[in-house]
Amino acid sequence: MGKIVTLLTDFGLKDTYVGQMKGVISGVCEDANIIDLTHDIEAQNIHSAGYLLVDAMGVFNDTSVHIAVVDPGVGSKRKEIAVKTEKGILIGPDNGLFTAAIKRYGFEGAVELNKSKYWYGHSNTFHGRDIFASIAGHLLNGVKMEAMGDKLDNIETIQLLEPKIEDEGIEGHVVLIDHFGNLLCDITEDDLHQSIGKLDDKVAVVCGGEMIRGIKRTFSDVWVGEAIVYIGSSMRLEIAVREGSAAKRFEVGLGDRITVKRNTL
């Protein structure tokens, strides 16, 4: 797969910020394979960015470099960091963005990126270009992470939403809403098996005050306009409306509760 670096930001594509980052990376490492994960993160939404990052990391090899920039504190005293995990190196602001990633893929060390000879520039408002992109290029060229900054024993974390598993069911939350209006939850397939056993038509899911019966396989298992609950590609519970938007249908948002029980009726 070559020298892979991924980019995840809330920059959008209207401006040239993403292109400038790519220019810096390729200027440092000419044979970098730059892959855009997304640049449409809701502005400054660290929680959503963290979930999207951890879901994407799994498809890349463990030598990949992942830049994530959702950074409401840019220019403040927050640190610029690189973090080593079993699925590659993360580069970005020390603001809790990497909490979900280190929870799943472990913490194998971190540095504060304070060795300016590895930077591209010194602006106060564009660390994505001036620090993170340049550092990524040097990593791809074989420079060790430890050479580019001082060791950190820990990094900032944020409180993640966690499902509550009980004998009679499980209570989780909406943690992502995708482009289609599908609701991605923090309830994993393993959580469901632990709590309610078999995933079949006797499972009842409550979302936005409405009950949806059964866990299906895919969208074609229901009629157009009908709600469906299924296990998505991230192996988490998802709620959708076939050829519609579950977010609009159920009028729910990030953090709203989802309840799953076995229907005894």
Image (cartoon, grey):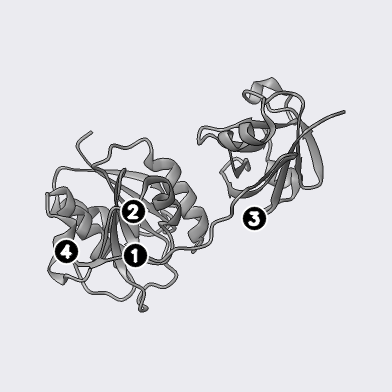
Q: Quadrant of the C terminus?
A: top right
Look at the numbered discs 1 and 2 and tell me whether their residues touch, using CB distance below 8 Å: yes
Residue lying at the far right of the rendered structure: 265
Question: In this orientation, does residue 154 appear?
Answer: yes
Residue assigned mark 4 = 148
Considering only vertical position in the picture, is 21 above or below 33? below
Q: Which mark is residue 107?
A: 2
Q: Which mark is residue 230?
A: none
Residue assigned mark 1 = 154
Is 109 on the left or on the right of 58, as rendered?
A: left
Mark in the foreground, 1 or 3: 1
Label 3: few (<14), some (14–19) or many (≥20) C-alpha neighbours in 10 Å: some
Alpha-carbon span between mark 2 and mark 4: 18 Å
Q: Residue visible at 77% across and 34% down?
A: 212
Question: In this orientation, does residue 40 appear?
Answer: no
Q: Residue visible at 33% across and 55% down?
A: 18
Going by the numbered disc 3, the residue's amino acid type is: Gly
Q: Secondary structure at mark 4?
A: helix
Going by the numbered disc 4, the residue's amino acid type is: Met
Q: Position of residue 55 (x, y in %)?
A: 45, 42
Mark in the foreground, 3 or 2: 2
Considering only vertical position in the picture, is 100 above or below 62? below
Pick whichever, 189 or 56, lies toward us. Answer: 189
